[in-house]
Image (cartoon, grey):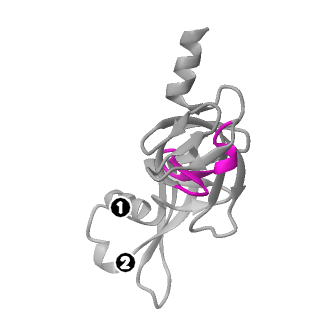
Amino acid sequence: MFYNVTLKTDIRVPPSELKRNIEEVVHERLIQNFESFISQEIGYIISIDKINTIGEGIIIPEDGAAYYETEFTALIFKPELQEVVFGKVTDITNFGAFINMGPIEGMVHISQTMDDFVSFSKSGALIGKDSKRTLKLNDKCKARIIAISFKDVTTPKIGLTMRQPGLGALQYLEDKKRKK
């Protein structure tokens, strides 16, 4: 789910930057420090929306830099269990498919791609034995988040399923609607 959140932090402005406009420097430092930041509590920080307040600068002895308490608004993506997401297949392997959901990628295990016996073809697609449906590179999909792991915070793992009703490759969902 995407959220606009308000966060507060101290931004270090080195002495060489104190001559410049503090708001510009603080904004640059926020982007540098927080865009693409990942945390289990916050999620994925996508962008810094705006600076709400910048406090008085405090100089730490023997550092020379000024620290400004800063409150800012950021756009974040926080994956939630059971959330339905849209994405695009970016890679197909013999064990499943990787789906780009915007700020992150998730993985659909081969057993979770469709309600059918699924095999990996030499052409690099996943094919259902009875349904003859295929899942291939660049297919647009609708999936549900079934697992989230922040064991390695730098590369969290998102597990997806497309086996439930209303989920799967969009081309098959549209075909099903037309048939009804």
User: Is residue 101 found inside the magenta-colored segment of the image?
Assistant: yes
Element on which disc 2 rests: loop
- Looking at marks 1 and 2 on the same chain, the residue that comes earlier in the sequence is marked by 2
User: Is residue 155 found inside the magenta-colored segment of the image?
Assistant: no
Which residue position is annotated with label 1?
28
Is residue 133 depicted above or below 152 in this figure?
above
Stretch in magenta: 93-114
Q: Residue at x 43, y 74 (%)?
A: 66
The CA span between labels 1 and 2 is 12 Å
Amino acid type at mark 1: Glu
Q: Position of residue 128 (x, y in %)?
A: 61, 38
Is residue 169 depicted above or below 41 in this figure?
above
**Number of marks present in the image shown:** 2
Element on which disc 1 rests: helix
Q: Is residue 44 left or right of residue 91?
A: right
Q: Residue at x 72, y 52 (%)?
A: 147
Amino acid type at mark 2: Pro
Q: Quadrant of residue 3?
A: top right
Q: Which of the two discs, 1 and 2, sits closer to the camera?
A: 1
Q: Quadrant of the N terminus?
A: top right
Q: Position of residue 94 (x, y in %)?
A: 57, 57
Q: 61 or 75, which is in the foreground?
A: 75
Q: Position of residue 117 (x, y in %)?
A: 69, 42
Residue 114 seen in render? yes
Q: Position of residue 27 (x, y in %)?
A: 38, 57
Q: Residue at x 62, y 30 (%)?
A: 131
Q: Neighbour class for label 2 at 10 Å: few (<14), some, many (≥20)?
A: some
Q: Residue at x 54, y 26 (%)?
A: 172
Q: Quadrant of the C terminus?
A: top right
